[in-house]
Amino acid sequence: MTPVAVVGASGFSGMELCRLVAGAPELELVAAIADRWRGERLGDRVEAEGPAADLVVRPQAELEGAVDAAAIVALATPAEVSIELAPRLLARGKRVLDLSGGFRLEDPAAYARWYGLEHAAPSLLREARYALPELPRTAGPSAPGIGEARLGANPGCYATAAILATAPLLAEGALEPRVFIDGKSGVTGAGRKLAEPYLFTEIDANVSPYRVGVHQHCPEIELALGRACGRPVAVTFVPHLLPIARGLLTTVFGAAIGEPDVAAILGRAYAGSPIVRVVAPEQVSIARVARTARAAVGGRADPERRSLVAICAIDNLMKGAASQALQNLVAMAAPAAPMEA
Amino acid sequence: MTPVAVVGASGFSGMELCRLVAGAPELELVAAIADRWRGERLGDRVEAEGPAADLVVRPQAELEGAVDAAAIVALATPAEVSIELAPRLLARGKRVLDLSGGFRLEDPAAYARWYGLEHAAPSLLREARYALPELPRTAGPSAPGIGEARLGANPGCYATAAILATAPLLAEGALEPRVFIDGKSGVTGAGRKLAEPYLFTEIDANVSPYRVGVHQHCPEIELALGRACGRPVAVTFVPHLLPIARGLLTTVFGAAIGEPDVAAILGRAYAGSPIVRVVAPEQVSIARVARTARAAVGGRADPERRSLVAICAIDNLMKGAASQALQNLVAMAAPAAPMEA
Amino acid sequence: MTPVAVVGASGFSGMELCRLVAGAPELELVAAIADRWRGERLGDRVEAEGPAADLVVRPQAELEGAVDAAAIVALATPAEVSIELAPRLLARGKRVLDLSGGFRLEDPAAYARWYGLEHAAPSLLREARYALPELPRTAGPSAPGIGEARLGANPGCYATAAILATAPLLAEGALEPRVFIDGKSGVTGAGRKLAEPYLFTEIDANVSPYRVGVHQHCPEIELALGRACGRPVAVTFVPHLLPIARGLLTTVFGAAIGEPDVAAILGRAYAGSPIVRVVAPEQVSIARVARTARAAVGGRADPERRSLVAICAIDNLMKGAASQALQNLVAMAAPAAPMEA
Amino acid sequence: MTPVAVVGASGFSGMELCRLVAGAPELELVAAIADRWRGERLGDRVEAEGPAADLVVRPQAELEGAVDAAAIVALATPAEVSIELAPRLLARGKRVLDLSGGFRLEDPAAYARWYGLEHAAPSLLREARYALPELPRTAGPSAPGIGEARLGANPGCYATAAILATAPLLAEGALEPRVFIDGKSGVTGAGRKLAEPYLFTEIDANVSPYRVGVHQHCPEIELALGRACGRPVAVTFVPHLLPIARGLLTTVFGAAIGEPDVAAILGRAYAGSPIVRVVAPEQVSIARVARTARAAVGGRADPERRSLVAICAIDNLMKGAASQALQNLVAMAAPAAPMEA
């Protein structure tokens, strides 16, 4: 069993990740770091089973000591924290899987524009392996496989759903490389923020867009889709906040090339995947995937309007964060596969 | 005061319409027809004030007698019922405002395709005046003004929001005539249907698309937008069901022509409107308009991606049905304006 | 028209009160005070109609000048603020209606125990008129009628519902003077607090009790019920937070005396009231009263168990705060009735 | 592994039970019966793992054949169905655990009164073992232990929460034997009923009582509490429907005897229980137990009012149905303990 530490254990994604790592036969949770719960027993906060329940949560100030026994450190922290911690951990010989956006883009300048921060570790951006397990072609061709990577970048929640729905259609030449993505997410997507927009009275019975055209997952989606089809892709992305706690659904629109059989293309892409289920577009729903590691995708072309639609639903904290991180951690823990695509 | 009757008073839209007509100084509610509440006092079911509260609800079997005193009959009934009732009422000299989709399209063949019904009164389709008050150019140039119309067609809820957001951009040549519309609606949009998809356990904590690409508001939006800009418009439309009772939000995507100032175009279109408020796109929300007659619209272009987004929120039962019907009823009741646009 | 000022206009109750005062023919809203919205046009924040919409919201630092034109000042402020402001306003010759708990109890010592504050104006506690319009016997026999009062105390939300359900049963000797009250409230009852328990993620899909046995409405209910029946009443009260924005329902349990006809007693108490509707207990619901000024009450005795149940639902911001305040403001504005009970 | 069949697999409780049995090391799910899903693969409907996922759901008409391989049959069916099926299954040598109310009461006459049905198998009522695992004293002294029982009666959801909160207090003489119970349940408690009260539009933003004083769990609670303390207990019970899918909370009120330490009594009763956690009453919440097998209980006495409150939260489909059934199935499957209390 590969020893794993989780930093940011008290966040929504971090909690799920602790639970999943504790239950994975290939991994052993050896440390949980979270200032908010410092000194508490992990099992009093997280539905972790087995010995992980008895871990005492450590504060971030004790990071180096806390992760000493870990081979891989998962960072469920904000991007600016991850950017600061990852180099320190790599320098101590740890491998790192980052769940934030801190290492998902290639160009340091994109961080100034989309994240509003000067990237403090730009040399790591080309090394980091973007890892969406079902779509290895979205990962960046020069990067190593996630199995050998020192630093893995776990995709964003919106990006995961958008890419799962869109990449196969672009890769097969069924869709013009200009797509329009409507994202809809439950409020845990924002993390555990004490801010007025996240009060019950603001969210209940309401739906509203935010960061229209300027959300930081836009360049991540463009980058991954561009890798998938080998040419630049323009993404116009509008996220919306839903009055639900968990779950995320993306609806992707674009101009079709020819008269593609969307269901067949998606079916080929995910044949044999235990995670991604291809269904009729009307069967894609948040309820179908909430609290699971699964994704549901479906779509349909409209030959008369020469357009197509592809829809994907995931649980934002699972396939959109923690269960995808688990997939990546297990891949990092496995003996290197000789010929990973 | 012009005497008005409401058929379908017990539906969600019908209830709102009874309440609004009862409170309008220009109108007098003289009859409410609904099998479900036959024989009950209207005021025991609807927040109607004044003498309307004491009306006794009549069954549909007594339609002709019940509407005898009315000059205008508002039909808050399903399309197939409206198509049957409207000719009978017109034959008795009544004017009719239909809230269903029964008279919104021009081509009888479109009813077979999108509504799954053989239209029983095709000759009325060219006479019916489609009436979205803020956008008279979407009404069909050959039709009379709603003030003189014998038969008015009140727009659909999704269509109202989609057209308010999109028509000015098309009319000003800022948007390519192929648009992608993501609709999101509360469950009252489906009416008071006793069906499993509308149970609390199915809707709560869920979001899902339905009728992907085949929703009956698609041709209505295409027709109205085509009239607004004078050329055919292709609309790809995906509606989604939200876990809220009321409210509707549409997010419209498309290719921009040039570098349009979306806010300025929308601002010009709705300058002086007491109903439509132009705000920043992030300020468009269902909470802002729920239970009101208002619409909120906003948008933004992305010059780098040569795309734009326009968003509109309304209350599906108010501006999406009853309060828009009230606007049209008041216009029908007014002495004919000599030079209506 | 009597000129009224509202302090605390940006709170949930204050917003409703501004809207109601602006629409009341007997009253004129002449000032709205709220630091949060200082300098903004009231109509941009509140659905106020008429000239009130054009009022500019004033900060609390300008209180004295702002209320200059008002005859009555309504305080929609926290108890500690009301206790500080009321004496200042009375000293300037204003009449005051306080919506907080600051003047609802008689005994200054009760404030230390239940509110955790030293009451700074204890001499006003005996003068203040507790005013639940439908139940004048709960008001304190030595106090003047609300019509003549300088200082009125508007009942609390839980207290209003609990007293409406219980007082008639105690007054008619149908119920032992030891009652058990289960309160259930939407989250607006807590005001607009930015605190973690009020985040969507904490409230959604959850129900929990709070302040079990120590809520500050307990002594208020005991005092009013004691006045209603002329002897001490012991109230055990547990409030619960519901995953809804608005509305409140109290379920009252106790030992029956004899075999009372609960419906008949409640019916007599509220005969002719336009506000309180007596219905079967299963017909009492939050949906029935939400966003209205009404209360619904119902109950039933169980002769075999010698017990009874009485249930009341109100909108916590309306009959539980603002619409009840409107009733009291109108009474204060009316020429003194010569023989008010 | 003991082979188990589940009848009523498509109901909310039946689905959970299939999932739990499939995952229990002591049990093997050998059949799932549900007309609604006849012929479907169980794993396509239920999150069952392992070979159970490949079971084909059988219709009820094939009951006898379908359960042939089972040693124990769990009935997740309505009471009237369970009453009909249990004798047939017992006659074929099966042991039965019934999740309905069909065998929870002792007196056949009580079924006419509370369930509105003539009990068709009255002779089984004395044999059936009522089994709330944490409180064996509530089971009926003459009945065999659940480990030896041919027929087990799984407690109702409200009853489970009410009894867990109340029985220890009665058994220790801390509470007068007349209690008042306010129940609050999510809508899955009603099962998967297609009826207007369960539509989203009726439940959302609403709370209302139902079956006030006449709910069928009342006599079940009285019977179990009477057994726990050895004398008759009068229960006045009002259930309420909450706008949430899952979870249930009961608030119990009564007159205290002496000045009991409620927390200490509850703590003693559940010391060592992995299921029931004793916490401060304000910490009892639905969120704490939703989707788990756990119960949370807490309470507090009010010496001044000589009263006490005890509160319990459970997941209505888990500890209120399926996970409690799992506890009982495992006990039935175990080799008989020689001296079960």
Image (tube, coloured by chain):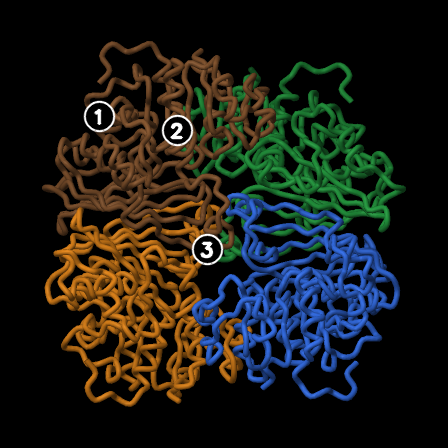
Chain colours: A orange, B brown, C green, D blue
Q: Left or right of C125: which side holds C49?
A: left
Check the residue under mark 3 and report the chain it is in: B
Q: Distance between the residues labelled 1 and 2?
A: 21 Å
State whether discs 3 and 1 lie on one chain.
yes
Q: Going from the N terminus, do you reach mark 3 or mark 1 first?
A: 1
> In the rendered image, which residue does mark 2 sit on?
B82
Element type at marker 1?
A: loop
Residue at (70, 20) in percent of width and height? C148
* Residue C85 spot, x, y in % from top left: 59, 34
Can you see residue D221?
Answer: yes
In the rendered structure, find residue A189 and report the number of the disc placed on it. none
Residue under label 3 = B205
Q: For the point 68% across and 61% down, which residue is it?
A: D79
The chain under label 1 reads B
**Cα distance between the residues tagged 3 and 1:** 41 Å
Q: Which of marks 3 and 1 is in front?
A: 1
Report whether D170 appears left or right of D39: right
Q: Do the residues labelled 1 and 2 touch (CB within 8 Å)?
A: no
Q: How would you rate the neighbour count of disc 3 (Cα within 10 Å): few for under 14, some for 14-19, many for 20 or more?
A: many
Q: Label 2 sits on what residue type?
A: Ser
Residue A30 sits above or below residue B72 on the image: below
Q: Is mark 3 on a helix, strand or loop?
A: loop
Quarter of the image for residue D333 reads bottom right
* Element on which disc 2 rests: helix
Tell me the residue that label 1 is attached to. B140
Going from the N terminus, do you reach mark 1 or mark 2 first? 2
Q: Distance between the residues labelled 3 and 2?
A: 35 Å
